[in-house]
Image (cartoon, rainbow, N blue to C red):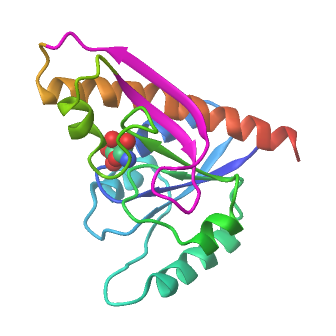
């Protein structure tokens, strides 16, 4: 069995999709860590029976918050750290310490449209092919090595809401799959 911790900042729908898929395997999601006290991901964690931790970035330095995150990770010793809608940039110290163990999902076909407006920028682009990217996390903003992408062709008739729905459907398909594959690999390496 290998273990993962999921980081969120809001809705947590990817977190839930991952938990439900991992529950069908020998692996385990041992915790959800969120920087927003009122995030809906806490409601999901409670329903899923996953221990949830709030780590605040408010009124203190990133270093202080990351020290708290690092203490949790030192205790939990996850094989994989899964960022799922986590809206904070981790410091180079953290990404180096956990290099090769932190992954993220981005709602665009990287290297196109990194940052926080991946869906809006994809929608506004002339691109016919849109999609999502799972990648390793390094110190940059959505710059780490790509692990997997899934794309679809748009008709051009869709509203932004419809495009968003298609993008999320791609996420719910490839993110849980990738997490399970990486947990399988971690297990094999033990
Ligand atoms: C997803 O679209 C993800 O690609 C992006 O943030 C969104 C998170 O949604 N990084 P949720 O919190 O998983 O519902």
The residue most toward the top is 155
Q: Residue at the spot x=11%, y=24% of the render?
A: 159
Q: In this view, does 76 lie to the left or right of 184?
A: left
Which quarter of the figure is the N terminus placed in? top right
Whether the magenta-drawn stretch holds residue 151 is answered as yes
Up the image or down, 42 lies above or below 164; here it is: below
Image location (x, y in percent) of residue 37: 30, 71
Q: Horizontal placement of 189 versus 15: left or right? A: right
Image quarter for residue 36? bottom left
Q: Position of residue 145 (x, y in %)?
A: 61, 43
Give whichever of 52, 115 is nearer the camera: 115
> Is residue 185 visible in the rendered structure shown here?
yes
The image shows residue 138, relative to residue 57, as above or below, that is above
The span picked out in magenta is 130-156
Q: Can residue 13 be seen in this view?
A: no
- The residue furthest right is 190
Which sits in the foreground, 80 or 22? Answer: 80
Q: Nearer the viewer, residue 13 or 182?
A: 182
The magenta stretch spans residue 27: no
Q: Is residue 149 left or right of residue 124?
A: right
**Which residue, as the protein is rendered here, is positioned at the far front?**
126
Total labels: the figure holds 0
Q: Quadrant of ligand 1?
A: top left
Percent x, y of residue 118: 30, 42
Q: Residue at x 33, y 31 (%)?
A: 168
Q: Residue at x 36, y 15 (%)?
A: 152
Residue 154, by quadrant, is top left
Q: Quadrant of residue 120?
A: top left
Q: Position of residue 146 (x, y in %)?
A: 58, 37
At horizontal 44% and vertical 47% (from top left) the residue drawn is: 48
């Amino acid at each position: 069995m290998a273990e993962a911790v999921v980081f969120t900042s809001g809705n947590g729908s990817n977190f839930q999709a991952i938990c439900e898929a991992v529950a069908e395997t020998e692996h385990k999601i041992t915790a959800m860590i969120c920087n927003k006290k009122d995030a809906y991901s806490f409601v999901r964690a409670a329903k899923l029976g996953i221990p949830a931790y709030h780590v605040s970035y408010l009124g203190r330095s990133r270093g202080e918050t990351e020290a708290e995150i690092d203490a949790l990770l030192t205790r939990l010793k996850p094989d994989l750290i899964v960022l799922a809608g986590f809206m904070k940039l981790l410091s180079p110290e953290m990404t180096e310490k956990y290099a090769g163990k932190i992954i993220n999902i981005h709602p665009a076909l990287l290297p196109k449209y990194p940052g926080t407006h991946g869906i809006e920028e994809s929608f506004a682009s002339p691109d016919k092919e849109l999609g999502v990217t799972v990648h390793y996390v390094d110190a940059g903003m959505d710059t780490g090595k790509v692990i997997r992408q899934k794309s679809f062709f748009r008709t051009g008739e869709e509203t932004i809401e419809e495009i968003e729905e298609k993008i999320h459907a791609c996420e719910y398909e490839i993110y849980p799959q990738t997490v399970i594959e990486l947990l399988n690999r971690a297990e094999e390496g033990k």
